[in-house]
Image (cartoon, helix red, strand yellow):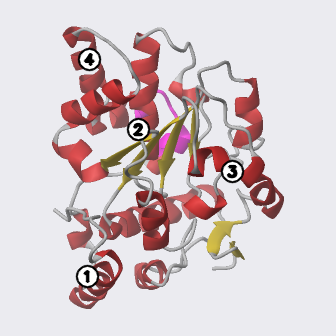
Amino acid sequence: MEQWFEYKGAFFDHRVVSKETLDNMPDYIIRDDDVVILTYPKAGTNWTIEIVNKLMRAAGKTDMEAKDIPWFFEGTLPEFGKPGHVIVEDHPSPRIVHTHLPWHLAPKMVSSPKGKVKVIVVMRNPKDTAVSLYHFLVKFERLTGIQSVTSWDKCAEDFLNGIAPNGDFYDHALGWWQMRDDPHFLFLKYEDMRKDLSNAVGKMKEFLDITLDDVTTSDIVESCTFDSLKTSWSEAGNQTKSLIVRKGVVGDWKNTFTVAQSEAYDAKYREKLEGTGLQFDFE
């Protein structure tokens, strides 16, 4: 995959992330009242941004719209034209900022936060993540003409071997999982959000110290269901988010994985997560 370059044990796409930016990330300043959303690629990034933004807007904490929040501050997307970390410098506090970075490359004020910084980590099972990443790369190629992936088999093999955006899935997950007892962090699972979004929104609301009446909260939950967001993004003509969103179904990996691929992924899952306390639902 020619678009990738390796940086301190993780892989990045040179078309959207530069070495210079990564060099500067450890000392990047996170404001004391920032809300940081942290995900591995294809693990519910924009979904979570929408929820948090709607909660904060309803609580009167921000006037910013989710569409103006750049996804991953270490990257540069065509629609924004400059790195996310530069764009958010002009955003009023409290800001919602996002990163895909692994723990060892993240700003120090995210990897070891102090003060009032709040970090919401959303994780997704590796099989569905790999399939979602593959379909994203295929769509990206159709949209830009830039080849990102040759086949599902190659993508599955690379992902299993840690050759994927932001590095090995398990290194990323476990790097952040070590912070699970830190009160600055809230950990959520994509699968749990799909099964009971109301419960997940309630956890976010409590974590962010937001008080809303039941009707407002219920309206936010309804507007942030996967199907509702998929429809609203499509109707708004948001090309990037239409590129990102697909099925969002838990267990969709079964339609793509071979038996051998599934067994190989299961073996690595057991090897990496046994004894860590971190587990995922696969259906």
Q: Quadrant of residue 83?
A: top right
Q: Amino acid at mark 3?
A: Gly
Q: Which mark is residue 132?
A: none
| Circle 2 Cα neighbour tier, 10 Å, few/some/many (<14 / 14–19 / ≥20) | many
Q: Which mark is residue 75?
A: 3
State which tag comes first along the sequence, 3 or 4. Answer: 3
Q: Position of residue 128 (x, y in %)?
A: 31, 64
- The alpha-carbon separation of the residues under discs 4 and 2 comes to 15 Å
| Mark 4 lies on residue | 217
State which tag comes first along the sequence, 4 or 2. Answer: 2
Observer-nearest of 172 and 230: 172
Quarter of the rendering occupied by the N terminus:
bottom right
Confirm whether the magenta stretch covers residue 256.
no
Q: Which residues are magenta?
A: 233-242
31 to 19, vertically: above or below: above
Q: Is residue 105 left or right of residue 259?
A: right
Q: Residue at x 21, y 72 (%)?
A: 254
Q: Position of residue 277 (x, y in %)?
A: 27, 65
Q: Secondary structure at mark 1?
A: helix
Q: Nearer the viewer, mark 1 or mark 3?
A: 1
| Circle 3 Cα neighbour tier, 10 Å, few/some/many (<14 / 14–19 / ≥20) | many
Query: Is residue 248 visible in this depiction of the protein?
Result: no
Query: Is residue 34 visible in this depiction of the protein?
Result: yes
Circles 3 and 4: CB atoms closer than 8 Å:
no
Q: Amino acid at mark 2?
A: Thr
111 to 64, vertically: above or below: below
State which tag comes first along the sequence, 3 or 2. Answer: 2
